[in-house]
Amino acid sequence: MIEAAILFAAGCYSVALLLDLWRIAQGPNAADRILALDTMVINVIALLVLYGVWRGTAIYFEAAMLVAMVGFVSTVAYCRFLLRGDIIE
């Protein structure tokens, strides 16, 4: 039963990733594209956690933490670039 729930959740997050890709391609401005990239990071984290639960190993949870840290830093860097034109002062 839990395997069916994990499969359903993974399918939902996969559809969300496809919708994020659509928003990146069709976004009217750069802020929408940055928000879609941040949402993609969240969906990838969820997929990694689901895969870790399905496989029963803890290594995917550590990978999810690494993706979360890189995603946060990249979102901040993109926003700073959008607002100021440079990342490092």
Image: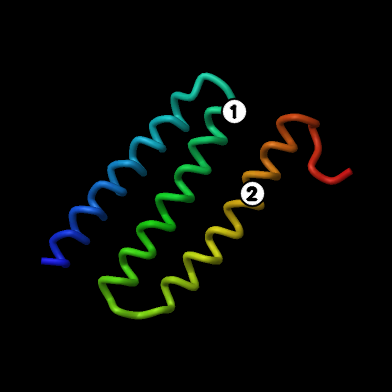
Compared with 37, 1 (above or below) is below
Marks 2 and 1, the one that precedes in the sequence: 1
**Residue drawn where x is 43% and y is 78% of the image:** 59
81 left or right, relative to 39? right
76 left or right, relative to 35? right
- Check disc 2: other Cα within 10 Å, few if <14, some if 14-19, many if 20+: some
13 left or right, relative to 77? left
Compared with 50, 89 (above or below) is above
In the picture of the structure, the residue carrying the numbered disc 1 is 31
Three-letter code for the amino acid on which mark 1 is drawn = Ala
Decide: marks 2, 1 in contact (CB < 8 A)?
A: no
Number of marks drawn: 2
> Which SS class for mark 2?
helix
- Check disc 1: other Cα within 10 Å, few if <14, some if 14-19, many if 20+: few
Q: How far across and down, in percent of the image, does residue 77 sit? A: 70, 44
Compared with 29, 57 (above or below) is below
Compared with 49, 11 (above or below) is above
> Which SS class for mark 1?
helix
Q: Which mark is residue 74?
A: 2
Q: How far across and down, in percent of the image, does residue 70 sit? A: 60, 57
Three-letter code for the amino acid on which mark 2 is drawn = Ser
Label 2 to label 1: alpha-carbon separation: 14 Å
Residue furthest left as drawn: 1
**Residue drawn where x is 71% and y is 31% of the image:** 82
Residue in front for this viewpoint, 80 or 53: 53
